[in-house]
Image (cartoon, rainbow, N blue to C red):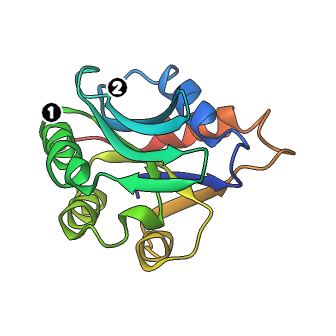
Amino acid sequence: MNNLFLTGKIGVGKSTILKNALKKIDLSVGGYVTERIFEGYYRKYIVKSLYDNKEKYTIIKVDSRDNSKKSFMEAFENGVVSILDKSLKYRDVIVLDELGPAENDIDIFTSKVFEILDSEKIVFGVLKDDNCKFINDIKGRDDVIVITVTEENRDFILEEVVEILKNFKTL
């Protein structure tokens, strides 16, 4: 078993725990993190490569005036899958921050995620607290550990997460 995911309510600190845990392990890191950027009326969600810290792709843009969303699925199909391919070949840990229902129907992306989960690499990610086939299929795997982050445990769960990651074996 070498796949660990954090889940929990929005804003509880899942990504913060993920980023802090990565600072405490001595392994090469690939994959991506998702960041939120505000530009005027717009809230953009950006996928940022951890493979080279250079590649960035806008995946969703939300207009705060009417809450309308524009998705950029080609960012997943091309850029994010490319980041994951390189990470699978050349990194010890592959970060998937975060996975949710928005990716449910992007077959090339979900196939790549399952290929990575089937590999011997350490996978460390965040799952949205949601119910869709993609998320449920990940949670239902025998080789996946899912830890729910709550307001009650978020301040002391970091060491447990780091210990799990250190106990995973890499190639």
Residue shown at 22%/33% (left/top)?
91
Q: Residue 57: image x %, image y %?
A: 28, 36
Q: Residues within 10 Å of mark 1 (few under 14, many from 20)?
A: some
Q: Is residue 75 left or right of residue 37?
A: left
Residue at the (41%, 48%) spot, across then down? 60
Tell which of 42 and 102 is nearer to you.
Answer: 42
- Determine which quarter of the picture holds residue 97: top left
- Tell me: residue 109, above or below residue 28: below
Question: What is the x, y in percent for residue 171?
Answer: 21, 41
| Above or below: residue 95 compared with residue 120 | above
Whether residue 71 is visible: yes
Residue 103 x %, y %:
36, 63
Which of the two residues, 145 or 32, is positioned nearer the viewer here? 32
Residue occupying the point 42% across, 63% down? 102
Q: Which residue is mark 1?
A: 90
Q: Around disc 2, counting alpha carbons within 10 Å, would you say few (fewer than 14), some (14 to 19), or many (20 or more)?
A: some
Circle 2: element type: loop
Task: Classify the position of the N terminus by image quarter.
Answer: bottom left
Residue farthest along the right direction in this orientation: 152
Give the x, y percent position of residue 109. Answer: 24, 60
- List the residue tagged with mark 2: 27
Q: Is residue 2 visible?
A: no
Instruction: Classify mark 1: helix, strand or loop.
Output: helix
Q: What count of labels does the image hold?
A: 2
Q: Are marks 1 and 2 in contact (CB under 8 Å)?
A: no
- In this image, 117 relative to 136: left or right? left
| Mark in the foreground, 1 or 2 | 1
**Is residue 119 shown left or right of residue 150?**
left
State the separation of the CA atoms marked 1 and 2. Answer: 11 Å
Mark 2 belongs to which amino acid?
A: Leu
